[in-house]
């Protein structure tokens, strides 16, 4: 069996150091808001290239905290509109509706599967306050055009970096940014299967904005900056010390692990040649974090079953787009053909830091022989 991703193998890869880190926290007897968080936040800020990292409970909370903080500051108010890609994991959109803001769905580009920067401007109204970009599948979603639209219309740029730890953006004049430092604020998920995954839930916000950082830290701690004094109506959303210690170990190996993902992706790109399979544009290849390796297939469901029968695990990201979900009934009548096409044709192949070249070549041979 070649699993879609073996979390056990991923943890074992740096197992000794992870074990030491967990034991250290247990022995120290300090489990929340301690030195492990401080250290991880400092190292993550250095890695991402932002002044601040605020650890929190998960990626959904990270995005909620960003919008809540903008509302507290007065940059946004309930009812304001946020432009967001229609092709994303539901959490991106849940964060917007949870905070009383209104998601305005934007179709992705057919070749990149990321938000279509040619379709954003027509969605901007007097009520638009932000554009959310999701670096989905580990591929850069930012473009210069999006940056210019934000500047021209005085919009915040929020990044959903849940799937793109270590993804790089190079500007036309060769400056380099890591995703999570491009926008005004970014939400990160450390869900176990992510490129930088915890041994449970975890998340973070990164930003260069000191006011935003202070409010988010308070909001994640019941709204408190000083013990038992509550300035905001916050929530309890903290990264615990064990997860912070584990993440700090795994952060050291993130680029190495991503390099392996790139090798796997390269093999798929160079060897997959089935006529019903289309590969999305994965360029710029060296900059892609390859969290997932999505392919589009005209006979997707049959391929999914065929690979399963041949003991290869694959996952569809995502079979039902947010606008067709029961929880957003009001959008069910919307027609977003590109998003729907992706939902009907996408299949993610195994990729990760531990899959072997032999396994990848077996998968490629199976797919190329699919009839
Ligand atoms: C694009 C995207 N946004 C947000 C999230 C939410 O992260 P979490 O599962 O940590 O809440 C996820 C992942 O699960 C995701 O893939």
Image (cartoon, helix red, strand yellow):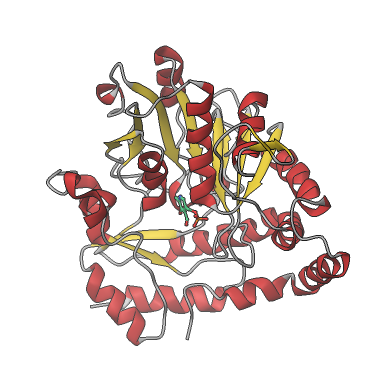
Is 265 positioned to the left or the right of 199 in the image? left
Decide: is 145 above or below 31: above
Quarter of the image for residue 242 reads bottom right
Residue at 52% from the left image edge and 48% from the top image edge: 61
Q: Residue at x 71, y 39 (%)?
A: 45
- 263 above or below 171? below
Furthest residue toward top: 152
| Residue 245 falls in image quadrant | bottom right
Residue 162 can be seen in this image: no
The image quadrant of residue 257 is bottom right
Q: Position of residue 28 (x, y in %)?
A: 87, 64
Residue 249 as seen in the image, left or right of residue 328: right
Q: Position of residue 343 (x, y in %)?
A: 26, 57
Count of labels shown? 0
Q: Say if 96 sits above or below 308 in the image.
A: above
Residue under the image location 41 percent in, 13 percent down: 152
Q: From the viewer's perspective, tell me whether residue 72 is left or right of residue 202.
A: left
Q: Nearer the viewer, residue 13 or 88?
A: 88
Residue 335 seen from this side: yes
Quarter of the image where the C terminus is located: bottom left
Asked if residue 360 is positioned above or below residue 338 in the image, the reply reads below
């Amino acid at each position: 069996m070649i699993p879609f991703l073996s979390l056990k193998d991923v943890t074992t890869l740096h197992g000794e150091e992870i074990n030491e880190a967990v034991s250290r926290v247990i022995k120290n007897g300090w489990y929340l808001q301690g030195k492990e968080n401080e250290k991880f936040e400092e190292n993550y800020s250095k890695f991402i290239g932002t002044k601040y990292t605020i650890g929190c409970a998960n990626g959904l909370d990270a995005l909620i905290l960003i919008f809540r903080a903008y509302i507290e500051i007065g940059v946004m108010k309930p009812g304001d509109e946020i432009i967001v890609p229609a092709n994303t994991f539901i959490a991106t959109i849940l964060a917007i509706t949870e905070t009383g803001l209104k998601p305005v769905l934007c179709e992705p580009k057919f070749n990149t599967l990321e938000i279509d920067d040619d379709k954003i401007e027509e969605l901007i109204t007097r009520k638009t306050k932000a554009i959310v970009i999701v670096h989905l599948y580990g591929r850069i979603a930012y473009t210069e055009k999006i940056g210019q639209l934000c500047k021209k219309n005085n919009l915040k740029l929020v990044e959903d970096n849940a799937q793109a730890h270590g993804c790089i953006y190079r500007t036309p004049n060769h400056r380099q940014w890591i995703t999570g430092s491009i926008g005004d604020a970014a939400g990160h998920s450390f869900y176990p299967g992510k490129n930088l995954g915890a041994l449970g839930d975890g998340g973070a916000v990164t930003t260069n904005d000191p006011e935003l950082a202070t409010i988010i830290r308070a909001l994640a701690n019941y709204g408190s900056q000083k013990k038992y004094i509550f300035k905001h109506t916050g929530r309890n959303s903290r990264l615990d010390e064990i997860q912070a210690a584990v993440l700090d170990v795994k952060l050291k190996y993130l680029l190495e692990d991503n390099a392996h993902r790139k090798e796997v992706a390269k093999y798929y790109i160079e060897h997959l040649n089935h006529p019903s399979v289309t590969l999305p544009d994965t360029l710029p290849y060296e900059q892609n974090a390859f969290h997932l390796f999505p392919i589009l297939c005209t006979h997707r469901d049959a391929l999914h079953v065929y690979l399963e029968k041949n003991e290869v695990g694959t996952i569809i990201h995502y079979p039902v787009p947010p606008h067709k979900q029961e929880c957003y009934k009001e959008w069910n009548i919307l027609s977003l053909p590109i998003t729907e096409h992706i939902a009907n044709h996408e299949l993610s192949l195994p990729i990760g830091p531990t899959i072997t070249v032999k396994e990848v070549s077996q998968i490629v041979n199976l797919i190329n022989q699919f009839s």
